[in-house]
Image (cartoon, rainbow, N blue to C red):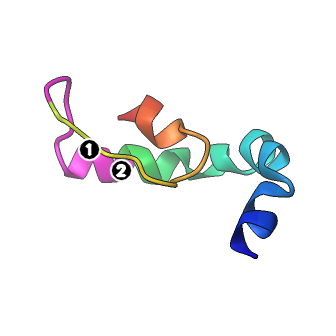
Amino acid sequence: MQGDLWSARAREWSELQEGSFRPLYDAAFGAAKVGKATLILDVGCGAGLACLVA
């Protein structure tokens, strides 16, 4: 059931909604002092914007 719900409009969510989380990602990674040598694990966290920001 969850697969059907989350994949039904994934492209639209990625293109229209995920960008609104950018300020949150910037603040969280800044506070955590994420840098070039930091390893992160992104598991089911959207379309990948968080990884790009990190």
Q: Residue at x 49, y 48 (%)?
A: 23
Label 1 and label 2: CA atoms lie apart by 5 Å
Q: Quadrant of the C terminus?
A: top left
Element under disc 2: helix
Assess disc 2: are there few (<14), some (14-19) or many (≥20) residues with their C-alpha within 10 Å of its C-alpha. few
Q: Residue at x 13, y 26 (%)?
A: 37
Q: Which mark is residue 16?
A: none
24 with respect to 15 (left or right): left
Element under disc 1: helix
Percent position of residue 25, x then y: 43, 48
Span shown in magenta: 27-37
Q: Is residue 8 on the magenta stretch?
A: no
Residue type indicated by callout 2? Ala
Along the viewing direction, whichever of 24 and 49 lies nearer the viewer: 49
Q: Is residue 39 above or below residue 9?
A: above
Q: Which residue is mark 1?
A: 30
Q: Is residue 45 above or below residue 39?
A: below
Q: Which mark is residue 27?
A: 2
47 with respect to 15 (left or right): left
Percent position of residue 38, x then y: 17, 34
14 with respect to 30 (left or right): right
Residue type indicated by callout 1? Gly
